Image: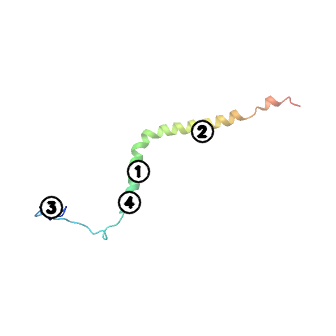
Amino acid sequence: MGGQVFGKLAFVRNVVYVRLSQYEQRAFPDFWAKTWNGFKRDFNSVAPYAGPFFLQAYVLYLWGEAENIRLKRKNPADYANDV
């Protein structure tokens, strides 16, 4: 057992290792296509459940902003008799 290097401890017969050269591979094959398809798949699976809640929150936000602007306005009837 002495003298053997780690990684070469066993001799295996009838096993074929197929490897591609790193120079023959593309670094990120179809990266954008797979990313876009994954995003569409994830969005389409979540949107029916999360969409109504976000829509309600957005409508509530718009109403709150409009109500705040309306309440901050001065009432002209309060100043009608000022000299």
The nearer-to-camera label among 1 and 3 is 3
Badge 2 crowding class, 10 Å Cα cut-off, few under 14, some 14 to 19, many 20 or more, is: few
The nearer-to-camera label among 1 and 4 is 4
Using the numbered discs, state the Cα–Cα distance from disc 2 to disc 4 in whole angstroms.
38 Å
The nearer-to-camera label among 2 and 4 is 4
From the image, tell me which residue sits under label 3: 9
Mark 1 vs 4, N-terminal side = 4
Q: Nearer the viewer, residue 12 or 56?
A: 12
Using the numbered discs, state the Cα–Cα distance from disc 2 to disc 1 in whole angstroms.
28 Å
Residue sitting at x 20%, y 65%: 18
From the image, tell me which residue sits under label 2: 62
Q: Is residue 68 left or right of residue 29?
A: right
From the image, tell me which residue sits under label 1: 40
Using the numbered discs, state the Cα–Cα distance from disc 2 to disc 3 in whole angstroms.
70 Å
Badge 3 crowding class, 10 Å Cα cut-off, few under 14, some 14 to 19, many 20 or more, is: few
Residue 56 appears at what percent x and percent y? Answer: 52, 36
Quadrant containing the N terminus is bottom left
Callout 4 amino acid: Phe
Using the numbered discs, state the Cα–Cα distance from disc 3 to disc 4 in whole angstroms.
39 Å
Figure quadrant of residue 76: top right
Mark 2 vs 1, N-terminal side = 1
